[in-house]
Amino acid sequence: MEEVSLIEVMEFSLGKNVTRLKEQNEDIYTPEDFECDLTNRIITGETYGCIINLIKSKAAPITVNTEKKVITQNFLKCKLDETKILPWYFCYKFNESKDLEQQIAMYHQGTTLSVRKLNVKTIGDLKIKLPDLEKQKLIGEGYRKSILQHELYLKRANDIRKYTLEMLRKIEED
């Protein structure tokens, strides 16, 4: 299994200053868009790279719904060399891997909580282990499905709670 720096398998483009974007009336990529990209239920097979939320230190694949949106300086767009690394595998490693978590923690050592924002150089220097593409696809698909399953469980729990509260209100009225 090959270990490489992220800069070797992807190109980065940092977002723009939000005040300049608002003046230009651009369609801006938001934290809500990030969450939607991460929990996207639409499977098109097409990917548009990944995006990293620099504040949360989380990655999501870019979907067809958000690929044309302009990103702010709190996000980093990643164009992956998909002959070496697949988007959902990258998201799994970036979001869940203890290896990358430790590397990011080392970077954050000595910084105050209010300034814990990743930068392009730090991300590019992160080391990642790359299994063959078939294994990456299997891991990435499992990760994507686990996120969707989690979202469905949360929705169901919320629906059950709403139903229960409605029943309690009806009982109270009788």
Image: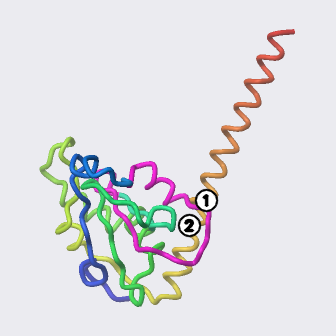
**Which residue of the protein is positioned furthest toward the right in this rendering?**
174
The reply, left or right, for residue 131 in relation to residue 172 is: left
Q: Which mark is residue 144?
A: 2
Q: Is residue 129 left or right of residue 133?
A: left
Q: Residue 19: x percent and y percent?
A: 22, 46
Magenta span contains residue 33: yes
- Please indicate whether residue 86 sits to the left or right of residue 146 in the image: left
What type is the residue that disc 1 sits on?
Answer: Leu
| Residue 169 on the magenta segment | no
- Check disc 1 and report the residue beneath it: 148
- Compared with residue 19, is residue 38 higher up or lower down, i.e. above or below? below
Question: Could you say where residue 149 lies in the image, as x and y percent from the top left?
Answer: 64, 58
Q: Decide: is 43 above or below 36.
A: below
Q: As rendered, which of 14 and 117 lies closer to the eye? A: 14
In this view of the protein, which residue sits in the foreground, 17 or 174? 17
> As shown in the figure, which amino acid type bears the numbered disc 2?
Arg
Label 2: state its secondary structure: helix
How far apart marks 2 and 1 lie (CA) works out to: 6 Å
Displayed quadrant of residue 163: top right
Q: Position of residue 65 (x, y in %)?
A: 51, 62
- Say which element carries label 1: helix
**Mark on residue 41?**
none
Describe residue 60's horizontal placement relative to residue 72 as left or right.
right
Please tell me which residue is depicted at 18% across the width and 60% down the height of the picture.
Answer: 107
Circle 2: is it few (<14), some (14-19), or many (20+) Cα within 10 Å? some
Say whether marks 2 and 1 touch (CB < 8 Å): yes
> Which residue sits at x=51%, y=84%?
135
The stretch of residues the image draws in magenta is 29-57
Q: How many marks?
A: 2
Name the residue: 26% across, 72% down: 12
Quarter of the image where the N terminus is located = bottom left
